[in-house]
Image (cartoon, rainbow, N blue to C red):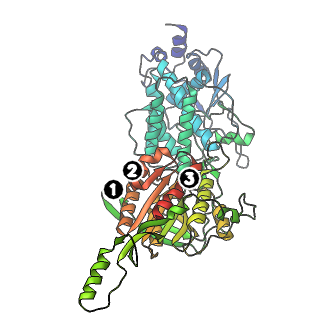
Amino acid sequence: MDLEQELIAESGLRTPGIATGARHPDARGVAPRVGAAAPGGVVEIGAGALSLYARGFGLRDIQADYFIHANGDEENPVSIPNRAAVTAEAITLPPIGLEVDSRLLADATVAHAIGHLRYSAPGRAVGKRKPLLVAMLSLIEDVRIERLMMREYPGLRALWGRFLHASAQLHAEGLTFSALTARLSFALHDPTYGDPLHWVHKGRSLIDAIGTDLHDSNRFEEAASILASDLGQMRVRFDVHNYEIVPAYRDDNTFLWAFDDSESVTVARANDGGRQEIEEAQPDNDGNDSGTSFDTDPEDVTLYYPEWNYQNETLREDWVAVVEGAPPRSAPALAFEVPLQNVRNRPHPKWHQTISGHRLKRQMDGDELDLDAMIEHVIAHRTGHESDPRVFTRAGRQPRDTSVLVLLDLSASTERTVEGTSMSLLDCEKDAAERIIAAFDGIHHRIALHGFASNGRSAVRYVRLKEFDTPYEATHRRRLHALRPAWSTRFGAALRHAGHCLSREAGKSRTIVLVTDGEPSDIDVFDSRYLIEDARHAVDGLAMQGIHTHCISLDPEAHTAVEAIFGRTHSATIARGMQLGPVLEHVLARLAA
């Protein structure tokens, strides 16, 4: 027996085989417990035994101990952290309650802390990272160092798995940040665990794609950033003050970060005994309120629409609430970069295509006979009636009456900046909308401009920015530029309501053009196929009403989903937001022609 194994055996916490994983770390009855009841009704393993156990992993100078118990009173209670803290010299554990296996929890906590000391870079600057991202980076770093530890000490898999499994079961139905990350942690630990949430499956796929190169921390950070961004899209609320790290053996992550001030420590440190409740999602993005224009107004009108459930092929009647409110009051009295008159006078190379070319019938002269008119002329002549001499056709051009409703995606993801510019995707949408209104809106080509974003099926917000029968004036421009990105994108309900608005138009050609930056998503839907199938059902229903639908997507990765909804000939995907204006003009010119 070598020195490390002797230390572990003498600690009273493990049999000698644990250091190599030769024995199951969850074996019971192999050694008596060490320690005694501490103030507050908790059991503590002796600090000396904890230090010996920690040194058994090869770190000779590390000390392990508990947070000092301090006496308080009712007016000045003393709060003791409920998660371990790690420094380069010491591992400090919280008191461990009687209701848990204190020995196993202490072992799991120390082993996890050793993983950070051996493999994590300490004291990284938080910088401008949002709290949700910091928490997600910390969680994925926990996963990385645990995989490295289990590679060297296989017996730790069962030890940590015991607590990860219990935590996932406890949060099986929850949708808070803590609940979702508890399920993700277990999914990344146990490949046999199946979770119904798409986000959990995505997390497993991202981490599994890294493979065995566990020292490449940059790839793990990329995965964490993607998962944090998805939670922002899902409108998962991150409560800094009540966030509790799960499972209980994981430390408070303050070893990983160098915070700017004492208040920021709450981003990573577990709340002292608090619990995060399931609350209605708030319109923030990764913990940031983006200043949405979708404020509740007493004059809002709520309409209910059905939604298609592809799983049982049923139409859920009155399932989604579309809340149509007044447009935003206006943007501040700012000096727009391009004056309204300049927008109207922009050159639009596709304008000449909006006059449709075809044969003009019943003409007094032309290059071909109009057979229908000629037959009527002969019949009238033979029956003694007055005949119409207009029996020719010729090539001609005349305006075609079209009504186009341009529907803008106003979701939080449109806040992304276009590469190489200072413009966001929503800025590109606004600019493109102004271009096509200036180029096409008139007597024969009527343009309406609407927008939408969703926050679950009970709140699909819909705003009318410009109607068909109103010219585009400075007031409309202020409405458009007052919009701010927020929430998610529930296509189906927005398309059905847009169809309702468009159904009142009397033109022969009625079309909805959806401009979006991705596939449909919402905070209360975790089946990635569900909203795609509902949107396709909505498109089919509009087609039966004689309303055409087109989509321009700004996300190449969403091309497959967009094409599945709108069809190949009715969808276009562009890689750069700056291309949106010309592409949208081309689409409308083709519709008008």
Is residue 522 visible to the viewer in this orientation of the structure? no
Q: Position of residue 583 (x, y in %)?
A: 53, 53
Name the amino acid type tagged 3.
Leu
Q: Of circles 1 and 3, which is in front?
A: 3
| Vertical order, 67 against 559 (above or below) | above
Which residue is tagged 3?
580
Is disc 1 in contact with disc 2, using a CB cutoff of under 8 Å? yes
Q: Say whether residue 8 is left or right of residue 51.
A: left
Is residue 87 visible to the viewer in this orientation of the structure? yes
Q: Position of residue 448 (x, y in %)?
A: 54, 68
Q: How far apart are marks 1 and 3 (CA)?
A: 32 Å
Name the amino acid type tagged 1.
Tyr
**Is tag 1's residue or tag 3's residue first in the polypeptide sequence?**
1
| Snapshot quadrant of residue 474 | bottom right
| Vertical order, 294 against 562 (above or below) | below
Q: Name the residue located 64 percent from the left edge and 19 percent from the top edge.
A: 62
Q: Distance between the residues labelled 3 and 2?
A: 27 Å
Q: What element carries label 2?
A: loop
Q: Of circles 3 and 2, which is in front?
A: 3
Identify the disc placed on residue 310: 1
| Vertical order, 56 against 80 (above or below) | above
